Image (cartoon, rainbow, N blue to C red):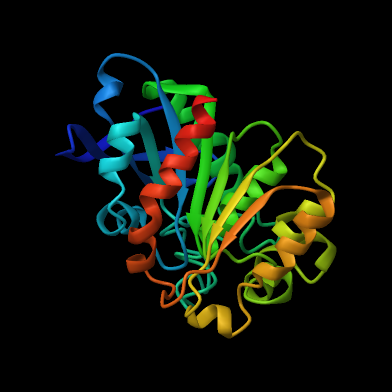
């Protein structure tokens, strides 16, 4: 598959690059960012996938989170894809900030309007990892995933739907039970009115039927997050499901932090340290 490099910048001894390719799953051109640490010059590296939130592109995480130093030190290749297909000429795809462009919700759409292009779950869990493994010094047996908000939801469902594929999962302010809150609008558009289909992309529901081996989860949630107080994130629900299934989850609720990248920047190095620990185990 042909990759077109858009940019390359040196950072903490490694290289922050952005590429474009044609996605088979999404039937459009997609950009993704990849950070290659100094270790990538001499051998295969641990791989960490970041999934961003609503309205984001591949640039938000790489320019705002401050992740480069920690991933350089631990020798991780970090991948940050876009959050949706773009420019697909779908009626209404630009009309709303939480459905359509910038709002793929990491599902495989089944409704006629969206199903040809909006297959972000297949893209981030299958197509993109294969592309990375084929073109970069990435160890396909040692990968993990994390994300923020809608991307935190994406990270959780990727880990829960693929036992043993991801060594660790963490999230910042994830949508933990989208069938009951923020996901309703997007899930209706992408998956239709049959709510049983929604549960296949809801972390709280997936935990209840998780069949796999041991999975450890880390969630950081700012206590002053406006979306938490509005009942859009519902972390208590996924924690209750994890407790029932005896899946270890570390939940931290630091005071004073909101939903922004200022919050992410404070704790990003700690998340990367946790991922490196499990990836090296």
Residue under the image location 65 percent in, 71 percent down: 183
Q: Is residue 248 left or right of residue 76?
A: right
Decide if residue 194 is in sight here: yes
Q: Is residue 93 above or below residue 267?
A: below
At a point 41% along the width and 78% down the height, the residue shown is 256
Q: Is residue 120 toward the left or the right of residue 79 in the image?
A: right
Residue 23 makes an appearance in the image: no
From this viewpoint, which residue is outermost toward the bottom?
230
Q: Residue at x 39, y 46 (%)?
A: 80
Image quarter in which the N terminus is found: top left
From the top left corner, tell me how far across and down residue 192 is, in percent. Answer: 75, 68
- Residue 44: image location, x then y, percent: 39, 18
Q: How many marks?
A: 0
Q: Is residue 259 left or right of residue 14?
A: right
* Residue placed most toward the observer, 132 or 110: 132
Residue 257 higher or lower than 252, as above or below:
below
80 or 99: nearer the eye? 80
At horizontal 32% and vertical 67% (from top left) the residue drawn is 262
Expressed as whole percent of the image width and height from the top left, the position of residue 84 reads: 48, 57
Among the 4 quarters of the image, the one containing residue 241: bottom right
Residue 258 screen position, x and y as percent: 42, 76
Q: Is 111 on the left-hand or right-hand side of 224?
A: right
Quarter of the rendering occupied by the C terminus: top right
Quarter of the image for residue 198 reads: bottom right
């Amino acid at each position: 598959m042909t990759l077109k490099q858009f940019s390359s910048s040196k950072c903490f001894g490694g290289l922050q690059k952005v590429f474009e390719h044609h996605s088979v799953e999404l039937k459009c051109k997609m950009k993704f960012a990849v950070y290659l640490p100094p270790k990538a010059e001499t051998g295969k590296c641990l791989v960490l996938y970041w999934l961003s939130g609503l309205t984001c592109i591949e640039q938000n995480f790489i320019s705002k989170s401050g992740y480069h130093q920690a991933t350089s030190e631990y020798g991780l290749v970090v991948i940050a894809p876009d959050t949706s297909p773009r420019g697909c000429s779908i009626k209404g795809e630009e009309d709303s900030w939480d459905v359509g462009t910038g709002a793929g919700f990491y599902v495989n759409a089944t409704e006629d309007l969206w199903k040809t292009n909006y297959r972000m779950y297949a893209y981030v869990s299958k197509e993109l990892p294969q592309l990375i493994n084929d073109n970069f010094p990435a160890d396909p047996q040692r990968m993990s995933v994390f994300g923020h908000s809608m991307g935190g939801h994406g990270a959780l469902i990727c880990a829960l739907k693929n036992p043993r594929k991801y060594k660790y999962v963490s999230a910042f302010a994830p949508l933990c039970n989208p069938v009951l809150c923020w996901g309703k609008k997007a899930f209706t558009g992408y998956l239709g009115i049959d709510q049983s289909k929604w549960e296949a992309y809801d972390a709280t529901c997936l935990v209840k039927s998780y069949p796999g081996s041991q999975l450890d989860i880390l969630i950081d949630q700012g206590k002053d997050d406006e979306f938490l107080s509005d009942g859009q994130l519902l972390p208590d629900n996924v924690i209750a499901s994890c407790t029932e299934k005896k899946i270890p989850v570390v939940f931290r609720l630091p005071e004073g932090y909101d939903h922004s990248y200022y919050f992410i920047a404070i704790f990003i190095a700690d998340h990367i340290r946790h991922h490196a620990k499990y990836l090296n185990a």
